[in-house]
Image: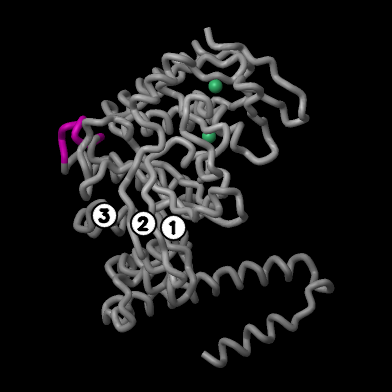
Amino acid sequence: MSELRSVVEALRSESLSGLPDARLEEDFAELHRVVEQLEAEGLRRLAEIDRRGLYERDGHLSCAAWLVAQHRVAFGRAREAVKVARGLEEMPVARHALDEGDVSLSAVRVLADAREVDPDAFARAETTLVEAARMHSLRDLQRVTAHWRALVEQEQTPDPEERMRRRRSFHASVSFLGMVKVDGNLDPETGETLLTALSAVLDAEAHSRTREDTRSPAQRRADALGEICRQWLDRSDRPQVGGERPHISVTVGLDVLKGSPGTAEFDHAGAVPSSVAQRLACDASVTRIVLSADSEPLDVGRRTRVVSAAMRRALIMRDRHCRFPGCDRPPSQCDAHHVVHWAKGGPTSMANTILLCRRHHRLIHDHGGFTLELVQGRPVFGRPDGSVLQERGPP
Ligand SMILES: [Zn+2]
Ligand SMILES: [Zn+2]
């Protein structure tokens, strides 16, 4: 291993500016080949670590989890590395071709992926598939393995509908800054259900859309999916989990709700700006949990609705729809907004609450955006530049 390090050291001290073009390309090709072989050797050791269960020593639940924690590898890459390492142990023909430099490590990854479908069938077809890897580009190899995979699946499940259903998957994972990445494959029936629900929400929006919509179609679909989930969560006949109807939870200090700087946190997506917590708490069920100085819960209060059902009905009678000038989204898409936030002492009274659709509610709570004040009991909306938007009174 120390020899390896001194080779790297020698490479590093080499000056590149004076190298002829041909040498530079040759060097790159040679390095690329060696790097792949080194990586293959790394994977061979990884497979041995996996076999001996060394990752269990520090309590890691899998070899991939160990890679993530010990070597700061992204989880997706760690899982793939373990898959390829294990696969190579069972793919002698591919291993040999890789060692000889006949196939690239990228091609081996494609093969290892295909092997997962049916290891036994793969063992029977390995020589042919490796031959394909030797001859074809990576893209073409992917086509070959996809074709092979389809054949194997056809043998396993002759029913084409069942074959499609088997491929269904759905992933939703938190990525940077709390964004949630969604991707997957839905079987035709579930897909049709999703598309129908999305287009129902989009149609309803198109009808009530009176101002110019600046959202892209993709953004509109994302909002529509949120609306579908929210309405499902709002249903009162849904099953309870742990004695409660699960809804989104955000943990926030009262001082932050009152406007002090600080953070708030979603259960799943993590940290969110305080303005989001203020907006969500504006019309919500609130559980009070008092924490001691060292964050031990001292007292847990009952879950109480900020705006009662009776008051919401009265608000709907009065406002009919979103009160933002020019908007007529129906009450089902509206929150009850406190003009003066309850955390800042604003009363939950008819005089201090107003119906706003989710998008306008967001607009009002965003720092530095639109404003809403009560002037002699009447709502006055202001643009970010301070000018007043014409308010349309309740009918
Ligand atoms: Zn509000
Ligand atoms: Zn609105």
- Name the residue type under label 1: Ala
Q: Quadrant of residue 366?
A: top right
Outermost residue on the top side: it is 395
Judging by the rendered image, the residue that carries numbered circle 2 is: 111
Work out whether residue 20 or residue 265 is closer to the camera in this orientation and state it. Answer: 265
Residues packed near mark 1 inside 10 Å, few (<14), some (14 to 19) or many (20 plus): many
Check disc 3 and report its element: helix, strand or loop. Answer: helix
Q: Which residue is mark 1?
A: 107
Residue under circle 3?
Answer: 125
C-alpha separation, residue under disc 2 versus residue under disc 1 = 6 Å
Say left or right for 57 vs 105: left
Front residue of this view, candidates 196 and 91: 196
Magenta residues?
Answer: 157-164
Could one spot residue 301 in this view of the protein?
A: yes
**Side of 83 relative to 38 (left or right):** left
Could you tell whether 146 is left or right of 23 in the image?
left
Total tally of numbered discs in the picture: 3
Can see residue 356?
no
Circle on res. 229: none
Mark 1 Cβ and ligand 2 under 8 Å apart: no
Task: Indicate left or right for 44 with 349 as reference.
Answer: left
Question: Which kind of residue does numbered mark 2 sit on?
Answer: Leu
Residue shown at the point (61%, 72%) measured from the top left:
31
Q: Are marks 2 and 3 in contact (CB under 8 Å)?
A: no
Q: CA distance from mark 2 to mark 3?
A: 11 Å
